[in-house]
Image: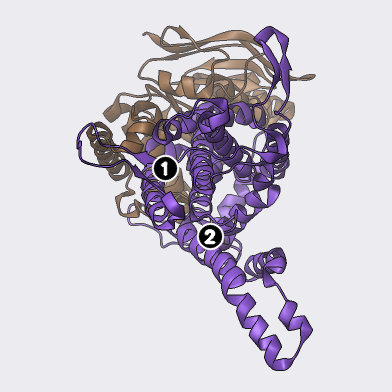
Chain colours: A brown, B purple
C-alpha cells in the first residue's frame, strides 16, 4: 500500500516539555488509522504539526509526496488535509451553510474585485459553491439546519457540521480529533458508522485521535499508540490491545502485573 | 456651509469602516486614511504645484494610494487585537495629520528637494480641483459642466449619492463573497479559519486596504467639495464621529449605518447648527434670559454624542439597527443556548452534561 502521510523522526518541544519526541509515523492511502494514548500523550500536538499550527522542532512531514513540515495551515489545507477540532471550533455566529462555504475558501477562485463588480464568473462560482455546500450539508444530515447559526445546533449536529466543513476543503486525508468526545454509546455508534461511510463512499483516508478504546478497536485498521510523546506501539487493533506497554500506559504497572499473573 | 458639513464624509466614511470592522474589530484610524485621501487629492490638483490633474483621474488614483498606506499601516498591526489595535490605529490617526502639517519644508538633498513645500503647512492647500464634466469631444455643442460651480451644493449631493451607492452596494457584495466570509470567519475564530484554508495575513491586509481606499475616496471628495485641505480638518474627532455613527446605528449592518449616519448628521448639522440657534434666541427674547439668547448648542455637540453613546451602550449595546449576527453576539449570555430536540437520525440526542465531561478529558 502507498503511504499518503509520513512523519519522519518528528519532535515538538515546548521549552523543556517534549510533547512529541522523535516519532515515526505513516498512514496508508484509503486506510482508517488511529492515534491513541492517554491524556497528554501528544496526539493533538501531532495533529497540529501536520496541519501547520505548530512548526515541528525537528523532523519532516510528507504528504502525498510533498514536504509540508512547517508550512502554513491554509497551505496544508489546500494540499488536501482537512481537520476537525477536539473542542468544537465552528464559526458560531455564521449559518451552517456559511460555515461550509468558508471551508471551500481555498477551492474558490473569485477575487474581491470580481465580487465587487459581480462578474458573471463569480456569480456562477458562488452558485455552484452554494449548491455543493448544500449537498454536503445533506450528506451529513444537516440540510434542514442550513440557515441556522452554528451555535444554535445541538451538540451532535455541531460535530457533523465540523466534519462537513472539513469535507468542503476537498481533503484527501481527513484528521478527526476525538470525533466521539462527549457522545453517548448510541451516538458514538452512529459516528463510527458515519466515519466508515466517509472512507468507503468518498474515498478518503482517515486518521483519528480517539480516547474511547471501543471506537478505535471497532473501525481502525491500524493503531498507533503514543505515551509521553513517544510511540510505544503500532499494529492492528488486536495486536495493540494485547501489548503490555499499552496496557501499562493506560492502566498502570499494577494492572499489567495483575494481568500477567 | 461649515467646513465640516459633508454628507459624503459621514456616509462614505462610516460605510468604509464596514469591511474594516469585520475581522479587525477596533480600528480608530479612519481619519488617517480620510486625511491621506484628501491630501493626495489636494497635492495632485493644487494649482501651485502645477499638476492640476483632472478630478476623475485623481479620484481613481486616490483609492490605490490610500490602499497602499492602508497596507503600510496595517502590516505592523496584524498581530494586534482588540484594545491594542485601537490604541495603535488611534496613534496613526494622530500621526498622519501632524506629519502632513509638517511637510511644508522638505529637504532631501539626494532627491533634489530643497525647501520643497508639499502640503503648505497649517494654511493647507487652497483651492483644489473641482470635478468637470467635459464631453465636448463627443457633443461639440455642450459646454463643460463644473460640479459645484457657484457653490451649488445640489451637484455635490448627486455626486456623493452616486459614490455612496457604489460603496454601499460594493460592501454588500463583498460581504456575501468569498472574502466577506473569510473576514467573518477570522473574526469568529482565526485558528479554525486558518485551518479551513483562509490565509489570515492576506485577508486582514485586504480589509485594511479596502477600508482605507473607501475612506481615502471619501476624503478626496470632501476635499474637492470644501475646496480646501488643511490639517485641522482631520483631527481625532473625525474618527470618533464616524465610530459613534457606527456604534449607535449598529455594527455590521450597512443599511443601519446608512440610516444612523443620516440621523446623526441631520441632528448635528441641521438641528444643532441651523434650527436650534434662532429657536433658542427667540425663546431667550421671550423669557428675557441672556443665557438662552447666547446658548450655542453646537458647542455641546460632543457632550450630547457622548451621552447618547453611553445611553445606547447601556440600554441597547448592539446599536439601534443591528445586524442579526451582532444582535446574537451581544445577547449570547442573556439567553440559554437553544437546546433542540434530538433529531430523528440520532436516537438519544445530545446531553449538555456530556459536554462537561468532555472538558475533563481535554488534552493539552
Q: Are marks 2 and 1 on the same chain?
A: no
- Which of A175/A32 is in front? A175
Taking the view exactly as shown, the residue that stands out farthest to the bottom is B287
Alpha-carbon span between mark 2 and mark 1 = 23 Å
- Which of A44/B194 is in front? B194
Q: Chain of mark 2?
A: B
B273 w.r.t. A112: above or below: below
Q: Circle 1 is placed at which residue position?
A: A99
- Which of B233/A104 is in front? B233
Q: Which mark is residue B250?
A: 2
Residue ID at (65%, 42%): B230
User: In the picture, which quadrant includes the N terminus of chain A?
Assistant: top left
Q: Is residue B33 visible?
A: yes
* Label 1 crowd (10 A; few <14 / some 14-19 / many >=20): many
Where is residue A40? Give x, y as percent.
Answer: 68, 29
Q: Chain of mark 1?
A: A
Q: Is residue B205 visible?
A: no
Where is residue A84? Give x, y as percent.
Answer: 48, 34
Front position among marks 2 and 1: 2
Where is residue B186? Give x, y as percent.
Answer: 53, 38
Q: Are marks 2 and 1 in contact (CB under 8 Å)?
A: no
Amino acid at each position: 500500500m502507498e503511504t499518503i502521510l509520513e512523519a519522519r523522526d518528528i519532535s515538538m518541544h515546548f521549552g523543556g516539555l517534549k510533547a512529541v519526541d522523535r516519532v515515526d509515523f505513516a498512514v496508508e492511502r484509503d486506510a482508517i488509522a488511529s492515534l491513541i494514548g492517554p491524556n497528554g500523550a501528544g496526539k493533538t500536538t501531532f495533529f497540529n504539526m501536520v496541519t501547520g499550527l505548530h512548526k515541528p522542532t525537528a523532523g519532516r512531514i510528507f504528504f502525498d509526496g510533498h514536504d509540508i513540515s512547517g508550512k502554513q495551515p491554509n497551505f496544508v489545507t489546500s494540499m488536501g488535509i482537512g481537520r476537525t477540532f477536539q473542542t468544537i471550533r465552528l464559526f458560531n455566529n455564521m449559518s451552517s451553510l456559511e460555515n461550509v462555504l468558508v471551508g471551500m475558501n481555498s477551492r474558490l477562485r473569485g477575487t474581491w474585485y470580481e465580487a465587487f463588480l459581480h462578474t458573471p464568473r463569480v456569480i456562477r462560482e458562488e452558485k455552484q459553491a452554494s449548491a455543493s455546500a448544500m449537498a454536503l450539508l445533506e450528506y451529513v444530515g444537516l440540510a434542514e439546519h442550513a440557515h441556522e447559526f452554528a451555535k444554535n445546533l445541538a451538540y451532535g449536529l455541531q460535530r457533523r457540521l465540523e466534519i462537513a466543513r472539513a469535507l468542503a476543503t476537498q481533503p484527501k486525508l481527513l484528521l478527526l480529533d476525538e470525533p466521539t468526545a462527549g457522545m453517548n454509546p448510541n451516538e458514538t455508534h452512529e459516528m463510527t458508522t458515519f466515519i466508515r461511510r466517509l472512507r468507503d463512499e468518498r474515498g478518503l483516508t482517515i486518521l483519528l485521535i480517539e480516547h474511547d478504546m471501543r471506537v478505535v478497536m471497532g473501525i481502525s485498521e491500524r493503531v498507533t499508540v503514543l505515551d509521553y510523546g513517544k510511540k510505544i506501539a503500532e499494529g492492528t487493533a488486536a495486536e495493540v490491545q494485547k501489548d503490555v506497554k499499552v496496557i501499562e500506559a493506560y492502566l498502570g504497572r499494577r494492572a499489567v502485573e495483575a494481568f500477567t499473573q | 456651509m461649515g467646513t465640516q458639513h459633508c454628507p459624503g464624509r459621514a456616509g462614505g466614511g462610516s460605510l468604509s469602516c464596514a469591511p474594516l470592522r469585520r475581522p479587525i474589530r477596533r480600528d480608530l484610524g479612519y481619519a488617517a486614511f480620510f486625511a491621506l485621501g484628501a491630501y493626495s487629492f489636494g497635492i495632485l490638483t493644487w494649482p501651485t504645484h502645477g499638476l492640476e490633474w483632472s478630478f476623475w483621474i485623481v479620484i481613481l488614483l486616490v483609492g490605490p494610494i490610500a490602499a497602499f498606506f492602508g497596507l503600510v499601516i496595517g502590516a505592523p498591526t496584524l498581530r494586534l487585537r482588540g484594545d491594542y489595535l485601537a490604541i495603535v490605529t488611534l496613534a496613526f490617526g494622530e500621526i498622519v495629520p501632524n506629519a502632513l502639517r509638517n511637510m511644508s519644508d522638505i529637504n532631501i538633498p539626494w532627491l533634489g528637494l530643497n525647501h520643497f513645500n508639499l502640503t503648505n503647512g497649517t494654511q493647507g492647500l487652497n483651492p483644489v480641483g473641482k470635478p468637470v464634466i467635459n464631453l465636448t469631444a463627443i457633443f461639440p455643442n455642450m459646454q463643460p459642466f463644473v460640479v459645484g460651480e457657484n457653490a451649488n451644493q445640489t451637484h455635490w449631493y448627486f455626486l456623493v449619492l452616486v459614490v455612496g451607492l457604489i460603496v454601499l452596494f460594493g460592501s454588500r457584495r463583498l460581504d456575501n463573497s468569498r472574502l466577506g466570509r473569510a473576514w467573518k470567519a477570522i473574526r469568529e475564530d482565526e485558528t479554525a479559519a486558518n485551518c479551513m484554508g483562509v490565509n489570515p495575513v492576506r485577508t486582514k491586509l485586504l480589509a485594511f486596504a479596502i477600508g482605507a481606499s473607501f475612506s481615502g475616496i471619501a476624503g478626496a471628495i470632501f476635499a474637492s467639495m470644501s475646496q480646501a485641505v488643511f490639517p485641522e480638518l482631520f483631527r481625532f474627532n473625525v474618527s470618533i464621529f464616524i465610530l459613534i455613527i457606527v456604534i449607535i446605528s449598529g455594527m455590521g449592518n450597512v443599511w443601519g449605518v446608512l440610516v444612523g449616519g443620516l440621523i446623526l448628521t441631520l441632528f448635528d448639522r441641521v438641528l444643532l447648527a441651523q434650527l436650534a440657534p434662532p429657536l433658542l434666541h427667540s425663546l431667550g427674547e421671550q423669557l428675557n434670559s441672556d443665557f438662552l439668547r447666547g446658548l450655542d448648542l453646537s458647542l455641546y455637540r460632543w457632550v450630547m454624542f457622548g451621552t447618547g453613546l453611553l445611553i445606547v451602550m447601556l440600554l441597547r449595546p448592539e446599536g439601534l439597527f443591528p445586524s442579526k449576527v451582532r444582535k446574537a453576539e451581544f445577547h449570547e449570555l442573556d439567553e440559554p443556548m437553544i437546546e433542540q430536540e434530538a433529531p430523528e437520525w440520532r436516537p438519544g440526542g445530545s446531553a449538555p452534561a456530556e459536554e462537561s465531561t468532555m472538558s475533563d478529558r481535554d488534552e493539552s
